[in-house]
Image: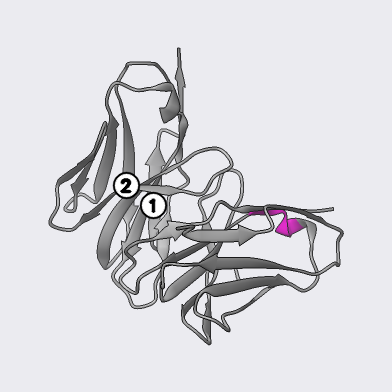
């Protein structure tokens, strides 16, 4: 069964600190992996998309890595800000026609001052 | 450029009532999707459409119906609402390759 698992479930950090979120997946055949940020009361917004051949991709203070061999990904947030407080969702797309995305349950990040 | 617009944003229904959620996109995307998001769970696909006039079941389709009469609109219907359908519903659209995936801002539905 295609699954995406994220850890930790929740995380609290101080403003200015770095953090790393983890994602493991068992999706086959693999097409791409995405990280989304979802603010409270809003829809998810894409941060990065990585295909099989991409190991790392950055979007400002967000850097995602992908190890397709071990089926693991991470999202590193540098110099966190209060506005980073949100749910971060790892999403994998299977390489099948008409197939939508497989979502992890998300990691809730709280950045405190 | 609005992207994906969902209406209404909030709704309270009594058990057994019916309603329709509207999703509209202005990006000329072929694919559209309806998801529900419940506490402690990832987004789950209800129904999706790969083009005008076509729909398909997702992971949790029971109790819902959909229609895609126009390319830009995707409607989600609840014929007889149940408390288990209390959730936040998200519409999304994308290209056939799954790129440009854009979500609406959600509809919070409460069934009492």
**Location of mark 2 (residue):** A24
Q: Is residue B86 magenta?
A: yes
Residue A11 appears in the figure: no
Chain for numbered disc 1: A
Label 2 residue SS: strand
- Point out residue A28 in the picture as x, y percentages from the top left corner: 29, 66
Residue A58, which numbered label?
none
Q: Position of residue B71 (x, y in %)?
A: 49, 79
Q: Which residue is mark 1?
A: A4
Near-viewer residue (A17 or A52): A17
Q: Are marks 2 and 1 on the same chain?
A: yes
Secondary structure beneath label 1: strand
Q: Is residue A28 above or below residue B84?
A: below
Among the 4 quarters of the image, the one containing residue A75:
top left
Seen in the picture, residue A81 relative to A28 is either above or below; the reply is above
Q: Is residue A83 left or right of residue B17?
A: left
Specify whether residue A79 is painted magenta.
no
Picture coordinates of residue B102, whole percent (x, y): 43, 58
Q: Residues within 10 Å of mark 1 (few under 14, many from 20)?
A: many
The stretch of residues the image draws in magenta is B84-88
Contact, CB < 8 Å: mark 2 with mark 1?
yes
Measured along the vertical axis of the image, is residue A45 above or below residue B47?
above
- The x and y percentages for residue B53 are 53, 87
Left or right, A21 with respect to B9, comes to: left
* Residue at position x 32%, y 52% in the image: A34
């Amino acid at each position: 069964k295609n699954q995406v698992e994220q850890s930790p479930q929740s995380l609290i950090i101080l403003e200015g600190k770095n953090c790393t979120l983890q994602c493991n997946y068992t999706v086959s055949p693999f097409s791409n992996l995405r990280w989304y940020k979802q603010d409270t009361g809003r829809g998810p917004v894409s941060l990065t998309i990585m295909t099989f051949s991409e190991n790392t991709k950055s979007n400002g203070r967000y850097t995602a890595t992908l190890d397709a061999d071990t089926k693991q990904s991470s999202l590193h947030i540098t110099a966190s800000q209060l506005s980073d407080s949100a749910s971060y969702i790892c999403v994998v797309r299977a390489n099948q026609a008409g197939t939508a995305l497989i979502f992890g349950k998300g990691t809730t990040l709280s950045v405190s001052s | 450029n609005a992207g994906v617009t969902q209406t209404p944003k909030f709704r309270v229904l009594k058990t057994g009532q019916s309603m329709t959620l509207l999703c509209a996109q202005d990006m000329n995307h072929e694919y559209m999707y309806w998801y529900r998001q419940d506490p402690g769970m990832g987004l789950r696909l209800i129904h999706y459409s790969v083009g005008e006039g076509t729909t398909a079941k997702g992971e949790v389709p029971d109790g819902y119906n959909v229609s895609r009469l126009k390319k830009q609109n995707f409607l989600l219907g609840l014929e007889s609402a149940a408390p288990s359908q209390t959730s936040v519903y998200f519409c999304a659209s994308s290209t056939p390759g799954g790129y440009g995936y854009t979500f609406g801002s959600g509809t919070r539905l409460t069934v009492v």
